Image: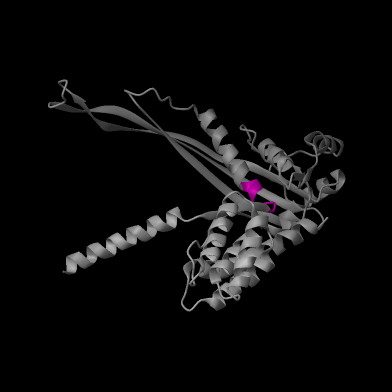
Amino acid sequence: MRNVSRSLLLVSGIAAVLMTGCAQKVKVKALEPAEIERAAVTKTIAVSEFKSDSVGLSQKIEAKISATKLDNTPYFTTVSRSDLDRVLKEQRMQNSGLMDEDKAVEIGKLIGAQALISGAISSTSMQDNSYRESRRKCLDKKCKRVQEYTVPCTKRTIAMGAQIKMVDVAKGDIIHGSTMQESADWAHCSDDSRALPAKADGLEKLSNVIADKFVYKLAPHYVYYYVVLLEDPDLEYSDAQKKNLEVALEFIKHNRYDRAEKLLADLMETTGGKSYVAAYNLGVIKEAQGQLSEAKDLYKMADELTVEPVEEINNAINRIDQAIEKRDRALKQIAVK
């Protein structure tokens, strides 16, 4: 009997997962603040050439900062490398890679930058390790007899480290400093066509990864997530109310939030404002439209209408305050000129 009970619980658990996986969802686009807040409010940036930079990491960072956009509008202004080189030459300064704060402030003021990024490639390495992999081959057409054997293989690990520093030109202090390490593995066996990359090719890939990760921290950005809708009536719906919910969900599936909103509002009215399914789904629409305060009110209404916890509503209540806080922080960062 105990085994039967366990089996039933397992089947129920699997069914619940499958039902959640098949539930209709809405894709939400949410604005989040930059991880490095002070970087986000320094809108004019210069990037100096890094020390020992054989892979062009500084140029990659500069290019990615220039390409950073929010709502199709460039977020940063970058001071051209030619202007930076010209000032260094005029001032008879040597670029030593990782600049101290005083030098960064002096240069930044001369070229009109609010922040200056400098750095150095601190380490690069490549290591090969040999190993063997098992193989099997059929000795007859029906594969009743099988031969097992091994083949020689090589795993190549390429690693790179970089020190990056961002200095506030006006305050003369470090906005952000980090040592970033990246590595990647490649494998090749004697019976495959995969080629191991040269060290320079591996470092090229790793430098792009480091540049992406560093620049991603500097500006506000959008993230995307999915929110599950409630599809089953929570009350004794009439046939017309069931149809309203069904059609509203269909409109949501086609991103017709205008029509879905009217249908769900009508469902709220005809149920005397007692349907948490209607209130919650309206909240999801508002969240997807970026109207977070309205979404919060609707989620709270839905929560108050429940007689026991509903996972989707609990998730929404926990999520929406964080979404509002992150959006407001991001908007403050954007507003700084």
Q: Is 114 positioned to the left or the right of 99 in the image?
A: right
Q: Residue 301 in the image: state x and y as whole percent.
A: 60, 75
Q: Residue furthest left?
A: 145
Q: Residue 68 in the image: state x and y as whole percent.
A: 71, 44
Task: Identify the residue shown where x is 55% and y is 72%.
Answer: 275
Quadrant that contains the N terminus: bottom left
Compared with residue 301, is residue 8 higher up or lower down, i.e. above or below? above
Q: Residue 307 in the image: state x and y as whole percent.
A: 48, 79
Q: Is 219 positioned to the left or the right of 137 in the image?
A: right
Q: Is residue 127 magenta?
A: no
Compared with residue 66, is residue 291 higher up or lower down, i.e. above or below? below
Q: How is the image coloured?
A: one colour
Taking the image as drawn, is residue 264 in sight?
yes
Question: Which of 261 and 45 lies nearest the eye of the viewer?
Answer: 261
Task: Identify the residue shown where x is 63% and y is 35%.
Answer: 53
Q: Residue 211 in the image: state x and y as whole percent.
A: 62, 42
Task: Identify the residue shown where x is 55% and y is 65%.
Answer: 241
Question: Which of 317 and 153 lies nearest the eye of the viewer?
Answer: 317
Q: Is residue 217 magenta?
A: yes
Taking the image as drawn, is residue 30 in sight?
no
Numbered circles on residues, count: 0
Question: Which of 214 and 237 lies nearest the eye of the viewer?
Answer: 237
Quadrant that contains the C terminus: bottom right
- Magenta stretch in the rendered image: 214-220
Q: Residue 5 appears in which quarter of the rendering?
A: bottom left
Question: Which of 68 and 185 lies nearest the eye of the viewer?
Answer: 68
Q: Residue 83 appears in which quarter of the rendering?
A: top right
